[in-house]
Image (cartoon, helix red, strand yellow):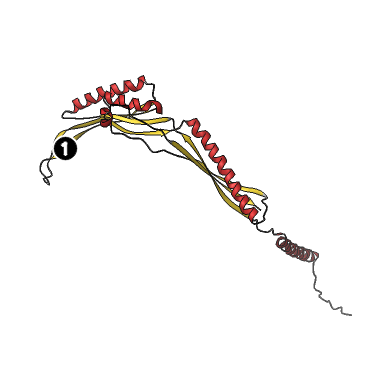
Amino acid sequence: MIKKSINKPIISYKFYERLGLFLFIISFLSLMSVSSVMAEPEPARTLTVTGNGMESIATTIAEVGLGVEIKGKNAAEVQQEIAKKTSAVVNILRSKDVEDLQTTGVRLYPNYEQVEQNSGQMILTGYTGSNTVSFRVSIEQVGVLLDETVKAGASRVDGVNFTATPEAIFNAKKEALRKATINAQDRADVVLDTLNLTSQEIVKIEVDDARVEQPQPFARDAMYASEAKVSTPVIAGEQTIEASVTMQIAY
């Protein structure tokens, strides 16, 4: 008797194993997607406010710039005259114990004059030279000191700026920041109270560096000062330090 062979499809165990793993992964990813959608938090509610603070302090120090300027026919003579008068001015400043005394500029240049209008031809008429210095001194001394230096030979006062001491400015910056912080918190409280909302926490703070506003400088013509019969009056002002603080508050 002849036996007929019957071919049956053979599905291996590994096939079922891989199929099961694939279905498990699909189910797991579906569950993760659904749970992430369900667990997505509500967008945070925040209020952003900016507070400003200001502190004014008296200026007690004068920063002065002055110098000697000479015109003459001969460059060497101009330079010698400048050196002579500058030396006299510097000696006075040193005798008054000024601070940060330093030379800020030395110049010597020729002066030309046009021979005829629109001719383009120039002739040398002489030289102008200058020597300038800067220093710091108390405001109580600056008026008399300006008069004395002008009499000694200073022919230009480039300017006088008033400032407070570094320590006073440092303390004023801290006070301005403190006021700005309180102002920001007060503004936030007003808004939230008006809307019947409650602040939860401060989530972000940004601090703008305190800005020091310079007072108006004092300046006076040196020639007028040399002719004055009384000492130069100098009245100090105030410096204003401003700061700002920005807060982001969750509610």
Q: Identify which residue, 211 or 28, lies in the foreground.
A: 211
**Residue most extreme to the bottom:** 1
Find residue 114 and report its horizontal and vertical position in percent.
Answer: 13, 41
Quadrant position of the N terminus in the picture? bottom right
Question: Residue at 48% of width from left, 31% of height from top?
Answer: 166
Find residue 90 and report its horizontal and vertical position in percent.
Answer: 32, 23
Find residue 243 and report its horizontal and vertical position in percent.
Answer: 52, 42
- 233 w.r.t. 191: above or below: above
- In this rendering, does residue 138 appear at all? no
Total numbered badges shown on the rendered structure: 1
Find residue 35 and report its horizontal and vertical position in percent.
Answer: 74, 61
Q: Tell me if 97 is positioned left or right of 124 in this view.
A: right
- In this rendering, does residue 110 appear at all? yes
- 92 w.r.t. 192: above or below: above
Q: Amino acid at mark 1?
A: Tyr
Q: Identify which residue, 52 or 31, lies in the foreground.
A: 52
Q: Tell me if 248 is positioned left or right of 212 in this view.
A: right
Residue 138 quadrant = top left
Question: Residue at 34% of width from left, 23% of height from top?
Answer: 93
Question: Residue at 35% of width from left, 35% of height from top?
Answer: 218
Residue 223 quadrant = top left
**Residue most extreme to the right:** 1
Neighbour tally class for label 1: few under 14, some 14-19, many 20 plus, Cα within 10 Å: few
Question: Residue at 16% of width from left, 28% of height from top?
Answer: 74
Residue 4 quadrant = bottom right
SS for dot 1: strand
* Residue hosting label 1: 112
